[in-house]
Image (spheres, rainbow, N blue to C red):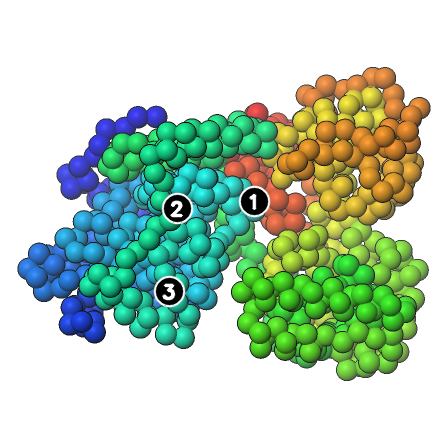
Amino acid sequence: MSAAVTDYEKIDFSPILALADDEVVTRSTVRDVRLPSGKVLALITLDNGRDHTRPNTLGPATLVELGKTLDSVKARAAAGEIQAVGITGKQYILAAGADLSDISKVTSQDHARLIAQLGHKVIGSLSDLGVPSFAFVNGLALGGGLEIALNSTYRTVDASAAAVALPEVFLGLIPGWGGAYLLPNLIGIENALEVVISNPLKQNRMLKPKQAFELGIMDAIFPAANYLEDSLAWADRVLSGAVKVDRKNEPGKIERLTKWPIAIKMARGMLESKIGTVPRSPYLALDLLDKARSGTKADGFAREDEALAELVAGDQFAASMYAFDLVQKRAKRPVGAPDKALAKKVTKVGIIGAGLMASQFALLFVRKLQVPVLITDLDQARVDKGVAYIHEEIGKLEQKGRLDADTANKLRGLVTGTTDKSLYADCDFVIEAVFEEVGVKQSVFGEIEQIVAPDAILATNTSSLSVEEIGAKLSNPERLVGFHFFNPVAVMPLIEVVKTPSTDEQTLSTAFVVAKGLGKNAVLTADAPGFVVNRLLAKVMGEAARAVYEGTPIAEVEKAFAPLGLPMGPFQLIDLVGWKVAAHVQDTMVRHFPDRFYANENFHALAELDQVVEKDKGGRVTGWTKAAEKTLKGAVGSSPSSAATILTRVQDGLAQEIRLMLDEGVVPEVEDIDLCLILGAGWPFIDGGASPYLDREGASERVFGGTFHTPPIRGIAAR
């Protein structure tokens, strides 16, 4: 990928300004700040005039206005009126990057290139003002927001800022306004690979301010209480020479010559083994990072222009935008959720059980809701173990600086563990985390119902059982709701809220409000076997098991599923969620749909083993353990299936199941199924979700003679 150096001043950007008709413009206002030394700093504040729930974004009109502002302060610097320029954002937010709603309207490479070039022209000028520029990262800084900071001469960050990241690869793009060139030259290639490629591919992991400071992305970090004042005082000391900025991770000649190419080669190998070679954005980002070790900044910016032009006009970005729209809009306005005003106020939470899952629930509830949380179990030893786990996890968060000492102590004090179930009496919301068996769940709810208030909400975390059947013996089944988390509880963003024919509006509303309070995205589903995610994952796991029992080596089966693009293969996933849980879900699905789901009695024998599969250092499944091989002896056939056959079977099985789920009314629309799989199973953005992928692969046509979307959503072609 080569590109000629561009003279941005000669480019006509009017074609893309037409995209900005409905843009919420982020204004760039300026005020002069006289520093303690007497020097004057022109402080630019980015603010779109909305509250903090609508972050500043950088659309074409915003960039044009910011460009004019920067031209003005540059002229003032030349006239000697100011000695520095600062740029910051409205409360809690610097900028959340480019306005993706505008970018998604672009269909030609020429217009896509103009968006990249306009960003480089404007944001790139922060390093060419004639005086030092300071980025005061006072809050969220994503994508173009972080690139504003990278193009500035110096950077400080608020210790309480929500997140710092370059998430573009997650969306099928690359950091296209300087990030791919500037970051590796600031913090070294290995750190840049983590920020630009690894983190986005780990479910869009982001940096906390302290991490950004430790990596060297930020030059200084200050507490929220006096952040701007401290930053301005620090800037004054930098200008006077009293503070020398030390950039410990800035790469030297040896790193560029030796470590850099090795790191790129290793990263390429890791990408190929984990995601295959079809996704474009990670590899274009890798090429840009590779070439950033030499040449000028202008060269780097020109390469970014061409890479972004290719990606924005491509099919993978179109699919990513469908997925992004689901996560950003549909997930935040759940279809079928009742008016939140109907919700019961939750002032105390009860958790039935004190095992690992229950303890994870307790930790999440106490951290996010900051209300008293009660856990119980059959004996005090189990209760004590659960409470100890919660206290230990709070301690870890404190050590990492994610909680201060006062908050940590407050949270510990809110958690109570006991065997005395009478203490559930004043709980408003009670959730069970007990053995996955209908009778057990009926029994515990029957006992608790006699203790709690008549309007207390009861929730079950069942992964596949009928919620209606669990509540069949309750006096008030209308207050029971399914509230299905995904593992790991703290990380996975989805909760399936399951409505039975009896569930009333107050119960349902409370469930949605609680889910939001926990920082989760809730999707409403009917009370159907496996709900959404587990029903479809059971199809995936069942087809994997079928292939194994036919005689296909386990490592070959894992590879056959790679084109789905899921974060892990089927057996790696089973090993994560637990073989007993997987066997139980599979049994549930086979019991309800014996003609469509595959299970094998040997699964239960495998589930009894301590270890079932062998994995490499990267967590990928390489084979069976000796104990598993012994268990499977005599049960495995001698007719292995090809990778193409296995893939076709799982594609067609998913297409059939999704069509049936829509016909059954499990969810209102196919978008809800895609949303569940993106949030609950990590289905990749660049596929756009499962249904667009199945349309493009021809599975929808093969199974029911049509498509889920008309016209089909562009995305990755057949792999």
Q: Residues within 10 Å of mark 2 (few under 14, many from 20)?
A: some
SS class, disc 3: loop
Amino acid marked by disc 3: Asn
| Residue shown at the point (59%, 29%) measured from the top left | 273
* Disc 3 to disc 2: CB gap under 8 Å: no
Q: Quadrant of residue 145?
A: bottom left
Amino acid marked by disc 1: Lys
| Residue shown at the point (81%, 27%) measured from the top left | 548
Determine whether 31 is above or below 569 in the image.
Answer: below
Determine whether 39 is above or below 23 in the image.
Answer: below
Query: Which quadrant of the rendered structure holds the N terminus?
Result: top left
| Residue shown at the point (81%, 78%) measured from the top left | 424
Q: Residue furthest top?
A: 639
Circle 2 residue: 249
On residue 491, the disc is: none
Query: Which quadrant of the rendered structure holds the C terminus?
Result: top right
Given residues 141 and 80, the one toward you in this image is 80
